[in-house]
Image: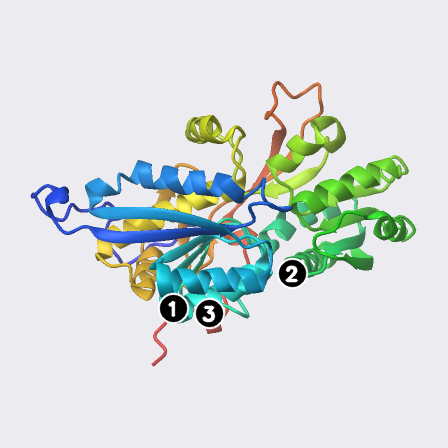
Amino acid sequence: MIRKLAMGATALTMLSAVPVMAQDMIDVKLGVLNDRSGVYADLSGEGSVIAARMAVEDFKAAENGLKVEIISADHQNKPDIGSNIARQWYEVDGVNAIVDVPTSSVALAVAELTANMGGVLLDSGAGSTELTRGQCQPTTIHWTYDTAALANGTGSAITKDGGEKWFFLTADYAFGHSLEENTAAVVKDSGGEVVGTVRHPFPATDFSSFLLQAQGSGADVIGLANAGGDTVNAIKQASEFGITQAGQSLAALLFFITDVHALGVETAQGLQLTSAFYWDHDDKTREWSARFEEMHGAKPTMVHAGVYSSVSHYLRAVAETGTTEGPTVAAAMKATEFDDPLFGKGYVRADGRVIHDMYLYEVKSPDQSEGEWDVYNMKATVSGDDAFLPMIDECNFTADKG
């Protein structure tokens, strides 16, 4: 259930009857920081820049007193590079908020720097629950998904459907560790067991030795605790080894529509996945996704949708507060519910975790698919309160600390 908040209506009040352009404009500079050339480029990359631009356009920023500039950079999935870019943006280039930031190790570094620099991190791409738990910051807004939500969707469904023995093939960095940990906990709570795990370098191209260990483990399910190109390559190589044909199942714990497109439904059919967004969910998502595809040449991922939605909510908060000061804007985002065309109704919790519904999907078979991007059947809706972990006291940044 969406909580009731003390703050008043979310509708933006115009600053005065005087035409906005005649007034002082608020300068807003957004930096889209993500992977533009590596394993996460398709699910994030230039598509996130396009989504941010669409948010500015749809908000009618100039009419609402905002002059918005968007810049972008490639963090190459490396925390040191991401941190250096973020520092340059805040100290020299006048950036007010950093957007997207897939790769959890990069996101955690940027989150701390953002809090120290007085900005806001609008994270759509990273998955680690540490962003709103052990390494939480008051100016982090974690919008789209996290590893707990993925585990509570895919991990729970597969275990309860008979996949009781799990072996994890895990990307060896913060995101993979978090996804493995959260899913293993759900598997055990659902009556299953973990029979083994192996960690692979990030990114990786050759999964043969890891898959052979998983094949020999006796597991019912091989949980792929990785994402993007790593997941695609692991599934392709598992097919070549005949793993699924021999009776083991693959669980792609973070799987994007771009991954299905890369594999094809013939290879991906039957895979279950959890997502916050699918372009064909309803009329609103279809209309927005058609516009996005015209500019990008592909349907949006949930990361792209999260960028659009988080930037939209951020711009509303800046217009309402009349400032780009990070703590003030983040507090305003947390104080105002949203009813979003892509995510529906939700709210930003005091720890920065955005609460909205998640969905369990299954990849269609070739005979079910009616087009290039017609790839999912929806199996279940998971409410936000059930999908995400409860807030811990240490990260309740709106509480009265006395």
CB under 8 Å between discs 3 and 1: no
Q: Earlier in the sequence, mark 2 or mark 3?
A: 2
Q: How many marks?
A: 3
Please state which of residues 211 and 363 is positioned toward the viewer in this rendering. 211
Specify whether 148 is left or right of 157: left
Tell me, for residue 131, which label it has, or none: none
Specify whether 209 is left or right of 226: right
| Residue hosting label 2 | 178
- Name the front one of labels 1 and 2: 1
Q: Position of residue 62 (x, y in %)?
A: 22, 42
Instruction: Please identify the quadrant where the C terminus is shown.
Output: bottom left
CA distance separating discs 3 and 1: 19 Å
- Name the front one of labels 3 and 1: 1
Tell me, for residue 395, which label it has, or none: 3
Q: Earlier in the sequence, mark 3 or mark 1?
A: 1
Q: Is residue 351 visible?
A: no
Question: At 35% from the left edge and 45% from the top edge, which residue is drawn?
Answer: 312
Question: At 83% from the left edge and 36% from the top edge, which residue is drawn?
Answer: 239
